[in-house]
Amino acid sequence: MASSMVTLTSLVVLCLVLATPLANAAQSCGQVQLTVAPCIGYLRRPGPSVPAACCNGVRTVFNLAKTVSDRQANCRCLKSTSLSLPGLNLPALGSLPGKCGVNVPYKVSPTIDCNKVT
């Protein structure tokens, strides 16, 4: 019984150690894209309100970007994604964070210079 408890405790500690860098790592562009994917319909045909799933994704992406490097990587991802998706309403894209209650110190657009994002 004691050895199984030690094994279980060791396994839990190992999982925590391995998970910590992942929790602190920046999101990959694929993760960012999946997180904000519920916004695509709205950005192609903006309506009176932004879907909750979209705003949840926007908040998640911006809340997980803790460093300047993270924010610049997200900016580059969102910029390249917006360039690859035809039919996006660019004014809706630029105003999306604000409509979701997210204070972003730059306007999301396909022309943004992500190196200036702080």
Image (tube, rainbow, N blue to C red):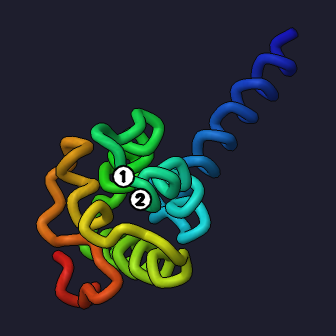
Whether residues under marks 2 and 1 lie with C-beta atoms below 8 angstroms apart, the answer is yes
Residue 69 at what x, y percent from top left?
A: 32, 77
Q: What residue type is labelled 1?
A: Pro
Q: In which quarter of the image is the C terminus?
A: bottom left
Decide: few, some or many residues near mark 2? Use Cα within 10 Å; few <14, some 14-19, many ≥20.
many
- Seen at 16% across and 71% down, the residue is 106
* Circle 2 residue: 43
Residue 111: where, in percent of width, then height? 29, 89
Tell me the residue that label 1 is attached to. Answer: 46
Q: How far apart are marks 2 and 1 (CA)?
A: 6 Å
Residue 40 image position (x, y, % from top left):
50, 57
Residue 6 or 49: which is nearer the viewer? 49
Quadrant of residue 13 within the rendered picture: top right
Q: Residue at x 55, y 54 (%)?
A: 37
Which residue is at the far top? 1
Q: Where is residue 90 in the image (x, y as percent from the top left)?
A: 31, 72
In the foreground, 29 or 19 = 29
